Image (tube, rainbow, N blue to C red):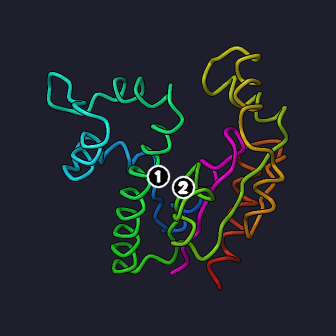
Amino acid sequence: MVVLGITGPTGAGKTTLLGEVEKLGGAVIDCDAVYHEMLEKDIALQCALESAFGPLRDKAGQIDRKKLGRIVFRDQAQLKRLNTIAQTAVVERTRELIEAYREQGRSVVAVDAIALLESTLKNLCQLTVAVLAPAEVRVGRIVIRESIPEDYAWARVKAQKESQYFTKNCDITLINDCASAEEFAAAARKKLGELIQL
């Protein structure tokens, strides 16, 4: 089984690549979704967060993400503390999911994580793949996908890491300068076919 780490900036085409992984019978682990599910259901993570940041429950007994956000987004030390707790939990859960997919006999598992390269998630992957696209192309996609103003889309794109960061730190780079999602899907499918043969 090949474990691929997928990363890259918003609007580059990661979702298209991940869709091709699934079409080939592979599994996708969305680390954002893993974290949000753990916030709701994982008692150990909930206790670790409350131990670090104090009471965080809402009236329904769930972790209040807005309250947590108010604590950490004003204080870099607290944000770093949250990231350490969250990443430790997500890496462990991702490891468990990879093993479960291995037992199912999957040929490929893609780990989708925006902070893949900054965390130990990359150590779970045999190969890391960056999906990149020109900034103006990404802005156009974000505007359409999220119905936001172009200047806001540009602000988001400029706030993310440069393409060179991903190219330098990933094993493989896929450039999505295709005219359509279908064209990129075909290119991604071809590349995945090569990688699964490893």
Q: Which residue is mark 2?
A: 112
Specify the farthest residue to the bottom: 198
Residue 55 vs residue 124: left or right?
left
Type of amino acid under label 1: Asp
For the C terminus, give its image quadrant.
bottom right
Q: Residue at x 55, y 53 (%)?
A: 113
Type of amino acid under label 2: Asp
Q: Residue at x 38, y 47 (%)?
A: 35
Q: Are marks 1 and 2 in contact (CB under 8 Å)?
A: yes
Snapshot quadrant of residue 154: top right
Which of the numbered marks, if any, corresponds to residue 44? none
Q: Which residue is mark 1?
A: 30
Above or below, comparing residue 146 to residue 16 in the picture: above
Above or below, comparing residue 99 to residue 72 in the picture: below
Residues in magenta, as a range:
1-17
The question of residue 2 being in magenta is answered with yes
Q: Residue at x 36, y 42 (%)?
A: 36
Above or below, comparing residue 32 to residue 26 in the picture: above
Relative depth, front residue between 137 and 159: 159
